[in-house]
Image (tube, rainbow, N blue to C red):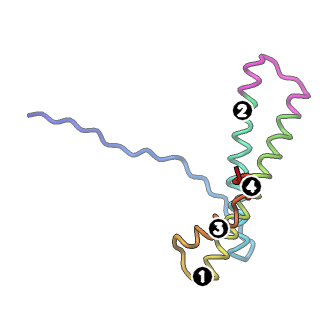
Amino acid sequence: MPRTSFSGVFSSPKVDLIVDLGNPFLNLTVDGFMKIGTVAAARVAAEESYHVLKRGSVSHHNFEHSLKRMCKEGAYWGTVAGLYVGMEYGVEKVRGTRDWVTYDINVLFTINKEEDSV
């Protein structure tokens, strides 16, 4: 009986930016800031591109607004990611181990209390 099979590997491209500040804590924090900040800026760029195509025109004001929004979102999400990664590294160093308790401690510190109360 004939058999057919399909095999392959799907992987995303990986780009690493190595920043050496002489301290592992700072290295991880800046790395998290850069990676997530770039993703947030790219997301805003995609959203704004969609809106430009939908409107059919671009103006200087819209371009400035898009650029400001990209910088704002990139800085915001980059800061949140940097704080989270830095806190995770700190808790891991203090506890001496990396397990689910480290994750839970980080989640407790990063939950926004006003948004969670319904």
Q: Residue at x 43, y 44 (%)?
A: 10
Relative image position of residue 18 (x, y in whole percent)? 67, 63
The nearer-to-camera label among 1 and 2 is 1
Residues shaded magenta: 50-64
Residue 82 vertical placement versus 23 (above, below): above
Q: Is mark 3 in CB contact (under 8 Å) with mark 2?
A: no
Closest to the camera, between mark 4 and mark 1, is: 1
Q: What type is the residue that disc 4 sits on?
A: Gly
Q: Nearer the viewer, mark 3 or mark 2?
A: 3
Tell me how far mark 3 sits from mark 2, CA to CA. Answer: 30 Å
- Which SS class for mark 4? helix
Q: Which residue is mark 3?
A: 106
Rendering quarter of residue 88: bottom right
- Residue named by callout 4: 78
Q: Residue at x 39, y 46 (%)?
A: 9
Q: Earlier in the sequence, mark 3 or mark 1?
A: 1
Element at badge 3?
Answer: helix
Q: Which residue is mark 1?
A: 95
Label 2 crowd bin: few (<14), some (14–19), many (20+), radius 10 Å: few
The 10 Å Cα crowd at callout 3, few under 14, some 14 to 19, many 20 or more, is some
- Dividing the picture into quadrants, the one containing residue 96 is bottom right
Provide the residue designation for mark 2.
47
Q: Mark 4 or mark 1: which comes first in sequence?
A: 4
**Label 4 vs label 1: CA separation?**
26 Å
Q: Mark 3 is on which residue type?
A: Asn
Residue furthest to the top: 56
Helix, strand or loop status at disc 1: helix
Residue nearer the viewer, 2 or 76: 76
Report the front residue among 2 and 106. Answer: 106
**Residue 51 colored magenta?**
yes
